[in-house]
Image (tube, rainbow, N blue to C red):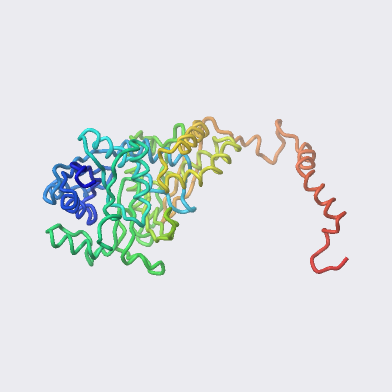
Amino acid sequence: MAKEIKRVVLAYSGGLDTSVIIKWLIERYECEVIAFSADIGQGAELTGLKEKAINTGAKKLFIKDLREEFTADFVFPMLRASAVYEGTYLLGTSIARPLIAKVQMEIARAEKADAVSHGATGKGNDQVRFELTYYSIDPHIKVIAPWREWDMKGRADLIKYAKLHGIPVPVTKAKPYSSDRNLFHISFEGGILEDPWAEPPANMYVLSRSPEQAPARPRYVEIGFEAGNPVSIDGKKLSPARLLARLNELGGEHGIGRVDMVESRYVGMKSRGVYETPGGTILHGARRAVESLTMDRELMHLRDGLSQRYAELVYNGYWYSPERLALQTLIDHATSGVTGVARMKLYKGCATVAGRKAVESLYHPDFATFEEDTVYDQKDAEGFIKINALRLKIKAMMDKAAGKGLKKGVKK
């Protein structure tokens, strides 16, 4: 197979793993390596990346600005689904992988590459996310996953290899963990975080200040929604990426969006992850506030019943699967009427709803009031209750006839 591989497109971050992989691919396959980095909001991490990739041995490096596409076509659809993995994780790393892999495949096609490669380990979820996307686009693509091929066992071996080849090492004693950042969040794992009893160091966080150090006065922010998507902050229209970036700033200032969890990886093991998702946390609460006014009860309950399944599909890498696409169609229909404004109170690590309004609200004080109204006769509730209680009454009657109504421990 090595002789067949002449050119490889590598998903490149500039971190320890992918920096080593450039040199390893050249040595192992005697091939040309084209590096690709997706700008999805890493900020300063992209600085100097081209020089580093070329110096490490890459033929060229493509950096593509995907921030708007990432937010509009990946983050926002996922938010409409109200997807939260295992009740805690807003899927910031998971949702980035299908976009990176998609564009990587576009570059591979344009550059007539023989294979694609990634730096995901053989124990993690990212290998699945990348490769399921590759194969959904080209079922015959050759995939090189170095962590499943080389004889290096862990980060210590990679650091040794990097030093041997003069590759800068970003993992140091001052930063004994790995991180992954995009416009939606930043994640931390490994190293000192592998002990689930150990509290993350205070200086680790990047996007948010600690709630203890957040301002003593709350900040109110109004978020406008149209057809399920956020479109404005305090009445000012913003593009999807700019809106998310602004909410990251506001949320981070007030210590919002920190998560520390032990999650269930798709490959079967548990892992500890620490996340910062300030803007996403605000948007999740704000959208649900507007939904409470504008979504039909049964539509909302149906969507919510599918949200966990949707979250699992995203987490496990099935973004381009037919079932995720089918779910998205239903979800987008269900949320098409979610238009309104949510007022959020940001204070000491919490983003709480302080108000919500919508022109086409399904909530009317005249209907919900305890005072007399013209659309609901309280006497009708009696028949409604009796009809809904019928199956319960029948079961109680049958249990009584069979002697099942007696308390345990009491003989007949």
Describe residue 195's horizontal placement relative to residue 111 as left or right.
Answer: right
Q: In which quarter of the image is the C terminus?
A: bottom right
- The x, y position of residue 17, in whole percent, is 24, 55
Residue at the spot x=48%, y=43% of the render? 310
309 or 82: nearer the eye? Answer: 309
Foreground of the two, 258 or 40: 40
405 on left or right of 362: right
| Residue 210 point in image, percent of width and height | 35, 60
| Residue closest to the eye, 263 or 160 | 160
Residue 356: x %, y % from top left: 50, 40
* x then y, percent, for residue 263: 44, 57
The residue at 25%/57% (across/down) is 150
Q: Is residue 344 toward the left or the right of residue 402 in the image?
A: left
Q: Image point 61% across, 35% down: which residue?
A: 364
* Residue 59 in which image quadrant: top left
Of residue 208 and residue 158, the one placed in the foreground of this image is: 158
Q: How many labels does the image show?
A: 0
